[in-house]
Image: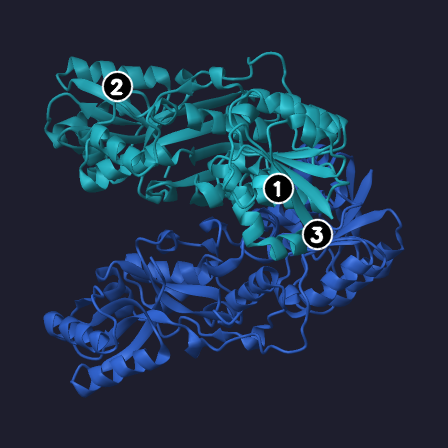
Chain colours: A blue, B cyan
Amino acid sequence: MKKFAVLGYGTVGSGVVELFYKNRSKIEEKAGTQMELGYILDLRDFPDSPYAEKFTKSMDTILADAEISVVAECMGGVEPAFSYLMQCLQRGISVATSNKELIAQKGAELLAVANAHNCNCFFEASVGGAIPIIRPLHRCLAANSITEIYGILNGTTNYILNKMLTDGMTFEDALAKAQKHGYAEREPSADVDGHDACRKICILASLAFGKHVYPASVYTKGIREITLDDAAAADALKGAVKLIAMVRQLDDGRILPAVMPMFVPYTNMISRVDGVFNCVEVCGDAIDRAYFCGRGAGKLPTASAVMGDIIEAIKHNQTVFSQNWVDTGTQDFIAGVDELNCGMFIRFAQDADTVKSSQLISELLAEQSHNDIPVTAVKNAALIPAALTKQERNAVLDKLNAQGFEVSHWMPVMEA
Amino acid sequence: MKKFAVLGYGTVGSGVVELFYKNRSKIEEKAGTQMELGYILDLRDFPDSPYAEKFTKSMDTILADAEISVVAECMGGVEPAFSYLMQCLQRGISVATSNKELIAQKGAELLAVANAHNCNCFFEASVGGAIPIIRPLHRCLAANSITEIYGILNGTTNYILNKMLTDGMTFEDALAKAQKHGYAEREPSADVDGHDACRKICILASLAFGKHVYPASVYTKGIREITLDDAAAADALKGAVKLIAMVRQLDDGRILPAVMPMFVPYTNMISRVDGVFNCVEVCGDAIDRAYFCGRGAGKLPTASAVMGDIIEAIKHNQTVFSQNWVDTGTQDFIAGVDELNCGMFIRFAQDADTVKSSQLISELLAEQSHNDIPVTAVKNAALIPAALTKQERNAVLDKLNAQGFEVSHWMPVMEA
């Protein structure tokens, strides 16, 4: 019999408890042993809960129980979650966490302590909710040199952008609807300004490239400035505006992580990921590309990932899986967003003649040896599907403005 | 230092060797040890290969080398692969195989012997090529009750159906093109008649539900009868015809596996999987649904999956992962395809008035208490997006025929 504890009885924590009792016999069969929920840590009181007798307000009570073999952390925030998990790992107790802020800030440290104490720090639930992505990336794709990762990693912003595109809602109205449905917080900054997606791409980038990428090192731009016109023009140019969290390895070995709205052509499956779903595209030298999609948040979907980690920690409690990365002390292996070579989705300040604008752009590209690029245009936007350097992009923008095609703004284009 | 051997130097086997030498330092880092390719087993001679000195024609040579810790089997077919892998496992040597025919026929037996001898029989490459699906299904989603799995598991047929839809090619022309590009064999029956997809859904069903599902127990229908008109009518009704391999658990606990062409609405991501890509949709009680997509075949994509298994077998050579299922001695837990409740994509023998046909179908559905079903029709086809029993389907078909709307054929509809 193996005992586990759950820290935090919010949406995810209560989901873990619910899922355990719902599928207990199946879960125990997978774990290869009988299991028991020992404790639920929460500062609040839940006197009417069917699990009332499991609640404790003291982490020490949990740490003092030698029978606890796994602790699931679903509290969120860096502290006290970090201190609690460090205490567990130092005692050789494996942990499973859904806390992306914690892993994005303290992952290297937690993983090192887990390794040193022959136990595991699992965090499948921290990225992509229900979607299996940490294990597949770390294990199934282990033989690949990962070259790029792209993801829709925040369901709230994807829901908002989707409503703008399909229902013609403004950003403000779509946000209000997301808040009404409980998809967005009353204080929506973590979602709409891209911070949540940023933490998740930090975790994927750290795992894929072996060095801790801190959120502060990642260019992060949210979706507040996206307009209905952007969404409609993108659709007319056969693509969708999506908040993309990405990381790419450059030729010199540095990596370029960023979070920003991008134009995604309809030929790329990521453009078809709608509503609150998340999707991660992983590119590697052997696999070409693979996609992982599913519910990126929610009670039971996220609990599924935490419980999968608990089962693995219990079943293989003698095995250290060490999905490792190190804090190199600097972030100088990270390139800035200006170094991203990419295509451009260009919005004009005034409607323009589509023949003239696309012809002019083709000429400007040819001047820079980008010949035969299939430029397409609608009256208020144009699409350049070629990987341009910053210098090339600036040349195009300057000359467009000089010729009277005033550019209002532009977005990077994801590859097809 | 750990030594491994590769059995079979065809497309996949040579890919494993190529990938190992290409990414060797990365692979060794992931495995946590230096690695060496000990032997390549093949009956043919490769005197000009850079690995000429590794070749052997004798399995006994490999078995006699006590330093071999993993054997990768990429020969295909049941024998001699089965005998070779049994000999390995009985000696405690873990194996990694890409051989779907072998696992679909002998999986239960191989897994039991692996468990008995404290080693692993891995088969990530046997389903979905590069796509991580075996590990995610078995481990990441372990806390779920799996309810349904749907997959595009054969890239050849998906390529053919795609060419019919987008380029208006006939089945015969599309097949010829697939053969020209090397996507289809000269003898294409295993692909186009659904046998390849059948083996793969047998493996996924066995893994998800714990009992060995044999290919002979699975209703299997290929794509030979799909016409250009079917593809065009499906498109007009906002969906694509796809060869779907599926398994669903029924309320009484039995499972219903099947391989057949289905109408997939464009709202389901599976409809967007084009060309030689594969995709698996897994439905579970906690996750709702998750999608896994990528290259389902090819040298390096498949080698990536085999190499991932080799790394895991070497890194965790003391851990038995026991992704188990048992041969129950009967197949009476398997329901026939007639028990599938599903919507219908109906093709008429002659063009019909769309208002009349959809109105009549709505009336027929209402007679059976299926009210307010949004039936849509084009002149030569109609779509019923409701889960009908066989009896209800037959009633609809009989009455349509009786009323002069002669039905040529119909296909099941996947859920949105």
Helix, strand or loop for disc 3:
loop
Q: Closer to the observer: label 3 or label 1?
A: 3
Observer able to see residue B248: no
Q: Distance between the residues labelled 2 and 1?
A: 50 Å
Question: In the image, which is nearer the foreground, mark 2 or mark 1?
Answer: 1
Q: Residue B195: which disc?
A: none
- Report the Cα–Cα distance between label 3 and label 2: 65 Å
Whole-angstrom CA distance, mark 3 to mark 1, is 16 Å
Which residue is found at the position 77% from the left and 58% from the top?
A: A114
Q: Residue at x 68, y 37 (%)?
A: B70
The amino acid on which the numbered mark 2 sits, given as a three-letter code, is Val
Query: What type is the residue that disc 3 sits on?
Result: Gln
Of pointers 2 and 1, the one earlier in the residue sequence: 1
Is disc 3 in contact with disc 2, using a CB cutoff of under 8 Å?
no
Q: Label 1: chain?
A: B
Name the residue that disc number 3 marks. B34
**Chain for mark 2?**
B
In this view of the protein, which residue sits in the foreground, B100 or A304? B100
Q: Name the residue under label 1.
A: B309
